[in-house]
Image (cartoon, rainbow, N blue to C red):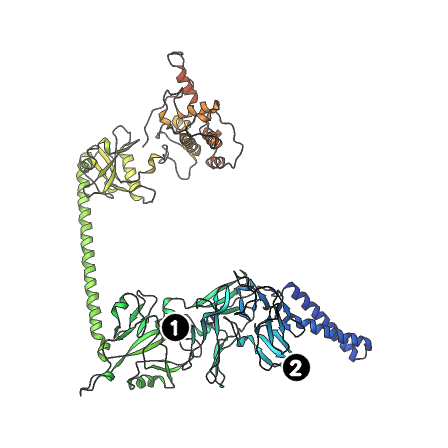
Amino acid sequence: MASLILKKIQLRPGTNLYSDNCNLILKKKKQHVHRASILMKNRVMGIVSGSRFVVLLLLSCYCIKFGTAMDTITSSNSIKDPGAITSNSGVFRFGFFSPANSTDRYVGIWYNIGIPEQSVVWIANRNKPLKDDSGVVMIAEDGNLVVSNGQKEILWSSNVKSPAANTSAQVLDSGNLVLRGITDGASLWESFQQPSDAFVPTMKISTNVRTGEKVQLTSWKSSSDPSNGSFSLGLGPLSIPQVFIWNNTRPYWRTGPWNGLIFTGVEHMYSFYLDGFNLVDDKEGNFYIMFGLVGKSYLLYLYLNSQGKLIQRDWDEGKRDWNISWSAPETECDVYGKCGAFGSCDSQKQPICSCLRGFEPKITKEWTRGNWASGCVRSKPLQCERTNNGSKPSKDGFLKLEKMKVPDFAEWSPTLEDKCKEQCLNNCSCVAYAYDAGIGCMSWSENLIDMQKLSTGGLDLYVRLEHSELDTTKERNRIIIITVVIGIIIIAISTFFLWRRKAKQRVNKAKSEEMLLPNKGDNIDEVELQRLPLLKFEELATATTNFSLSNKLGQGGFGPVYKGTLKDGQEIAVKRLSTGSGQGSEEFMTEVSVISTLQHRNLVRLLGCCVEGGERVLVYEYMPNRSLDAFLFDFGMARIFGGNQNQANTKRVVGTHGYMSPEYAMGGHFSEKSDVFSYGVLLLEIISGRRNTSFYNQEHSSSLLGFAWQLWNEDDIMALPYTDQCHFQEIKRCMHVGLLCVQEFAKDRPTISTVISMLNSEIVDLPTPKQPAFIERMIAVDIESPQNNQNRCSINDVTVTNVEGR
């Protein structure tokens, strides 16, 4: 149970549980008492005059009265809502509170830390709440402690039949509220004798076998209603001590037998975890369990919640909150009698319930549906149950079950271990036995109820079976045969797949050699090609309907891409190298080598290739929702720009025209600003709704950049499609940022991080954009039209060899 696994919660050095007012009162009280003691000493020694002695006595009486008001209620010192008193050490507080989500007022005790309603350990008027704040806690005329409302109606009383004439109630540092006679100090009534739902250190959960009196916990009805709920916790019938949780009168959970150190049916309970936990027989008919904390620098308690779960809470001083460190029942198997008679529950298996060996479901139909309450019955009767026919059958035996929560209704005997088995075997009514050094011999003569397989702890349980049920030879032979057969099947399957793989590798190698024979002059790496399946060109032509235009997916810099379907129905994307692409065998093999070895969720998988005659074909997996290559472009730099570079030069300019920066297109120089230029073109395409390549001698602009620059200079943003007054400023800012990105000189362009800040409006004032690249050239071309001047030369004219990008 929860208190069984006690976790020491260390309070921070210097932690004070007093409120500021309590500290002040204590300080003054100590000062008064100290002064009083000094004056008394002086008076005894004849130093103090008689008048000062009278003053001293009056001051001492005042101090005593003032001190008792902190943790004590007397006939002249009551508590009115919302007042409260605090125990001497400040750990517990007694007064008025309201549960969460409730306006009713209750009188109770709670830990004086955290949120009061989260740590209430006792309630006086739990079944008769106050409906307003007129409540009073006082000592009545008959000496009882009572709770009354504004109409003087008594809602709760300690109900001592013969209280002393003069009494007081004090809340102790243990959380116990004690009603005492002031004259003799004898305890007349304690809250620990009438607990609510909480079990705190030094409290006793008890039962008296002579009188039948019990002290047990009772759950709240709900989290906002502290009245008596359906669940209760206490000590069960004491053949062997164990703790029960009952749902009304039906058992709901139990701990298993107590062996002097632990409850044997609670998982992960070890004696070295315990801190003063014990079960005591006072030899007067009282049995009780309690736990006391050895150290006082940590706080914990247990409570029974409204769902019937026992929960241990520890105070975490670092978080300033209560932690739940243990609870039960935790799994379905913890619920009492889950699998019925002779059924064992194991939360690690599915289904969780199973009949013991030698038993079968009593109602098979219900059992298969997951209703295990009917339990199990014996498959074969025991020897003692047979009719004596003159033969002498073999004796019954016992099946050993390890780490078990033993069944309920055990019968105890002081027999030693070696005699326990013999005693059960000689008793025809004995169906099982178990032995523990701290308990002794336990036996069962009726149905075995509430058995559970534990992962740790538990006891060895020996269940009586008919002799033939214990014949393990057949079972062992069956296991051996099954194991051997399964092993042979696994070896045969593994051998077949290994042979098939080798054969396929030989075929692929032969195909590769056959296809490469006519092209020995090409720079083809045969080893690299062997990594991929080699497909015939004829097969790919059939798959793509002879590379028909209807199957064409797109056109790259190095050739077209077609959709195809292989004979087995697999859809593929076929990339056929164009003879005019400028890509040679070296680039082809580079692509084969890199993509075939890369596996990434954002990279299309290479399925195979074809090298046949002058044909170079790559086969990729087909993307049904189309690839992102229709929207994202590398602008020629994906293969030439290293991951650790921010600028470089290349002698081979490869990319998509219209998106390449001028310094890259004309000089082969590229940097991160080249990507910014390309991004600017994309941004202008998005807000204009037109592709860069759609402009040619239209509207006196031969490119998107010229069109955007013209609209910017004419302040004619509304000419863009989908532009309205609601989004005018956003579109204008996007055009502004786009023009800043496509400026001719790289040093004028912003970095991509600055672009993001501009688009997010983190930078309010944007610089004025300069004229985009290529604009002068475009204007010059426009001037050269026959209507103007045919002999006029272009400005900033640069000749660039056009090489289409892949």
Residue 646, picture quadrant: top left
Q: Nearer the viewer, residue 729 or 579?
A: 729
User: Is 147 positioned to the left or the right of 444 in the image?
Assistant: right
User: Is 787 positioned to the left or the right of 17 in the image?
Assistant: left
User: Is 167 positioned to the left or the right of 521 in the image?
Assistant: right
Instruction: Using the rendered image of the protein, determine whether residue 782 is visible from the camera's viewpoint.
Output: yes
* Residue extending farthest bottom: 390
Q: Is residue 225 shown above or below 212?
A: above
Q: Nearer the viewer, residue 67 or 601?
A: 67
Q: Which residue is mark 1?
A: 457
Q: CA distance from mark 2 to mark 1?
A: 52 Å
Looking at the figure, which quarter contains the C terminus? top left
Q: Nearer the viewer, residue 212 or 510?
A: 212
Q: Are marks 2 and 1 in contact (CB under 8 Å)?
A: no
Q: Nearer the viewer, residue 66 or 356?
A: 66
User: Is 122 positioned to the left or the right of 51 in the image?
Assistant: left
- The percent coordinates of residue 377 (x first, y second) are 27, 75
The kind of secondary structure element at disc 1 is loop
Residue 347, picture quadrant: bottom left
Q: Residues within 10 Å of mark 1 (few under 14, many from 20)?
A: many
The amino acid on which the numbered mark 2 sits, given as a three-letter code, is Thr
> How many badges with numbers are in the image?
2
Instruction: Using the rendered image of the protein, determine whether residue 525 is visible from the camera's viewpoint.
Output: no
Residue 696, picture quadrant: top left
The kind of secondary structure element at disc 2 is loop
The amino acid on which the numbered mark 1 sits, given as a three-letter code, is Gly
- The percent coordinates of residue 196 (x first, y second) are 51, 71
Q: Which residue is mark 2?
A: 183
- The percent coordinates of residue 528 (x first, y second) are 26, 41
Looking at the figure, which quarter contains the N terminus? bottom left
2 or 1: mark nearer the eye: 2
Q: Residues within 10 Å of mark 2 (few under 14, many from 20)?
A: few
